Image: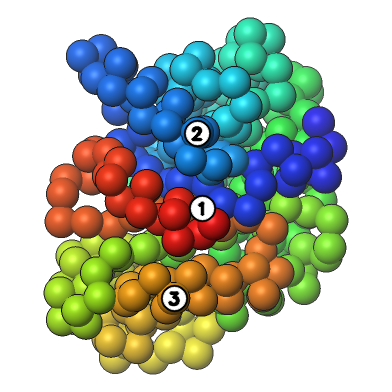
Amino acid sequence: MSTSTLKDRIGRYGVWSTGLRVEDPARRGELAEAAAELEELGYGAAWLGGSSAARHAVPLLDATATLVVGTSIQSIWQYGPEASAAAFAEVDAARPGRFVLGLGVSHAKLTDRYRRPYSALVAYLDALDSAGVPAGRRVLAALGPRTLKLSADRAAGAVPYLVTPEHTAQAREILGEAPLLAPEFKVVLESDPERAREIARACLARYLELPNYTRNFLRLGFTREDVAGGGSDRLVDAVFAWGDEARIRDRIGAFQAAGADHVALQVVTREAGDALPREEWRRLAALLT
C-alpha cells in the first residue's frame, strides 16, 4: 500500500484508545460492537493505545469492513522484529491492507532494556525489511527531528503522541509533503474550565514523569514550570481540547492547518483507561461533520 493510499484509507480522523486493546475474552463482543460503530460514525482508523500488537487488532478488523487498525504504539523492546513480522503477515493475509504497524521506543522508565533507542529502532526496521514487512505499512511514534526524518525515510510516516499544532508544523517541514503525519490529540468534552483541566491533569501527570515528553515540551518553548506540578494551565490547554463544540472543533482543525493528514483523537474522561467512551465518540463524531 502506498502512503497516499494509506492517507485515503484512514481519512481525516481516527480514535485513539487503550480500551480497544483489552484482551479479556468476555469483552470481545463489546470491542467488536464498538469497532463497528466507529466505522459507522465515519472514523477512518482505530489506534490501539499502550504497547499493543497485531493480535489486539484482530477483533476490530473482523467486526468491520473498511476500518484501518494501527498499533500506537508497539514497543520495540517488548516484541521482537521476527515475531512482529510473522504476526503482521498473518493478520494482513486474512485482512489485506487494513492493519498498520505503529512502532516506538517507549521510555527508559518503562523498560530496563532501554539502550541507544535510535540505533535500536533502526536495527528493528532493518529486520522488518528483511522479513518483508512493507515500509508503507508501518509508522513511527516520532517526536524529535532524527526520528521524524527516519519516519519519512523508513516508514509511511509518523504518529507523534502528546504534541501541539506547533510540533505538527515542525514535523511536516521535516517529513516533507508525502509521508503520513497523524498526531494524537486529547479531547475533554467539558466546557467548564476547572472541571476540564482537572480531568486533563489526571491524565497528563503520568506523562510528565517521562523525559521524552518533557524534553519535547521544552523544545517547543514551554518552561520547566509548565511541566511541573501536573502541568500549567498553558500546557494543559495546549495538549488538550476542551470547551464548547466550536472551540474543540477549532483546536482539532489547528492540527490540520499545521499539516496533519489525520488526527488520532483520544477522548479523556474520569473513567478508567480501559473504558470505551462510546457516547463521547458519538458526540465527537457529530461535531466533526
Q: Secondary structure at mark 1?
A: strand
Q: Position of residue 51 (x, y in %)?
A: 40, 37
Can residue 165 be seen here?
yes
Q: Nearer the viewer, mark 2 or mark 1?
A: 2
Quadrant (top left/top right/bottom left/bottom right) for the N terminus: top right
The residue located at (66%, 47%) in the rendering is 11
Q: Nearer the viewer, mark 1 or mark 3?
A: 3
Point out which mark residue 40 bears: 2
Q: Earlier in the sequence, mark 1 or mark 3?
A: 3
Q: Secondary structure at mark 3?
A: helix
Q: Earlier in the sequence, mark 3 or mark 2?
A: 2
Name the image colouring: rainbow
| Residue 276 drawn above or below residue 173 | above
Would you say 21 lies left or right of 24 here?
right
- Residue behind mark 1: 264
Q: Tag 3: Cα neighbours inside 10 Å, few (<14), some, or many (≥20)?
A: few
Q: Earlier in the sequence, mark 2 or mark 1?
A: 2
Q: Tag 2: Cα neighbours inside 10 Å, few (<14), some, or many (≥20)?
A: few
Amino acid type, callout 1: Ala
Amino acid type, callout 2: Glu
Point out which mark residue 246 bears: 3
Q: Nearer the viewer, residue 47 or 130?
A: 47
Q: Position of residue 166 (x, y in %)?
A: 59, 80
Q: Give the distance between the C-alpha atoms of the residues marked 3 and 2, in whole angstroms.
A: 23 Å
